[in-house]
Image (cartoon, rainbow, N blue to C red):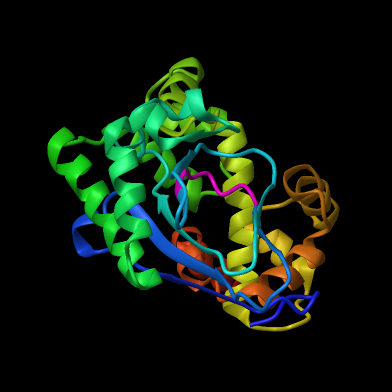
Amino acid sequence: MHDRRGTSQLMYERLPIPALHDHVSCVWVKHVTAESSPSTHHTIPNGSAELFCVVGSISKLIGPQTHPTEEPLAPGTTAIGVRFRPGVAAPLLGDLPSELLDRAVDADDLWGQGASQLAEEVAETQSPEAALACAEAALLKRVTRRAPSADPLADAIVRRLLVSPGESIRALASSLYISERQLRRRCERATGMSPKTLHRVFRFQRFLALAHAEGDPRPNVGRLAREAGYADQSHLSREAAQLTGRTPRAVLDDCRRTHDHSLSHRLFLTGALYSARSRRAAA
């Protein structure tokens, strides 16, 4: 696979092992060949925290982001990542997501010796899949040892924000029989973000997911904006500029060029395709 500079790279996602499905949305690998020029791993806000590891280096725990990030990758580098599901990462991170908002910390700061051991095991692997297996095994140990239990209210908040793009935060709080203040507190504790910010991030990811599912190389951005929950295309453009620093179409073009995001987008298609099709049928 090649990016706009001709950099040779392989990137793919897959589902986590079944024992981690409740905690992890996907795992991924990115490899830059030794003959390639330097590459950059780009990430835009998605509401999730991640475990990120360049093979041969200490792992990083990356908190939820409100702006795009870039990670330079030298030729011959293999990086792996584990993306946590929004709202369930705290026991696995070793800290509250709110304390890691827009931050990346060395995993040994939170995991201690376990992070160093993981780095050593990953460095000794012979393939990217073996490196991913090491990371999954380390997380499974944390899940088993800490036995994290979900906050039912936080889980309900995240699910509603995922599938109800047109619902106001006030209406959401009212439907859950809690105050807006409590809604904000429980959401920030579980996800690191306020409900409003998380809603904005989910809505933009829903736009990307709908565009990807449609498969049109030149989609109708205005229509997709409305189906994703935006007032109009201008609303989408403003949000894209704040979250990614680029136009919506530039983000779509970059996503198509780099790799298949089907697994990343699954989370944001829950209910979105049905809602979009229903609106089209009613039009």
Residue 272 rendering spot, x and y as whole percentages: 52, 63
Give the left or right position of residue 88, taking residue 70 as reference. Answer: left
Q: Determine the residue positioned at 40% across, 24% down.
A: 186
Say above or below: 138 vs 270: above
Query: Chief secondary structure of the magenta span?
Result: loop
Q: Is residue 246 left or right of residue 126?
A: right
The reply to whether residue 63 is in sight is yes
Q: Left or right: 161 with respect to 137?
A: right
In which quadrant of the rendered image does the C terminus lie? Answer: bottom right
Q: Where is residue 39, by image quadrant?
A: bottom right
Count every numbered label the image shows and give the total: 0
| Image coordinates for residue 75, horizontal then vertical, percent | 64, 68
Tell me where residue 100 appears, x and y as whole percent: 51, 29
Is 182 placed above or below 103 here?
above
Toward the viewer: 206 or 149? 149
* Quadrant holding the N terminus: bottom right
Q: Which residue is drawn at the image coordinates 45% and 34% (left, top)? A: 191
Instruction: Using the image, determine if residue 18 lies above or below residue 179.
Output: below
Comparing 128 with 121, the one in front is 121
The residue lying toward the viewer, choosing from 273 and 64, is 64
Q: In this view of the protein, can residue 21 be seen by the observer?
A: no
Per the rendered image, the range of residues in magenta is 44-51
Between 78 and 133, the one nearer to me in the picture: 78
Q: Is residue 21 magenta?
A: no
Q: Which residue appears at 37% of the width and 28% of the height?
A: 110
Q: Position of residue 113 (x, y in %)?
A: 28, 33
Residue at 60 percent across and 76 percent down: it is 33
Q: Is residue 48 magenta?
A: yes
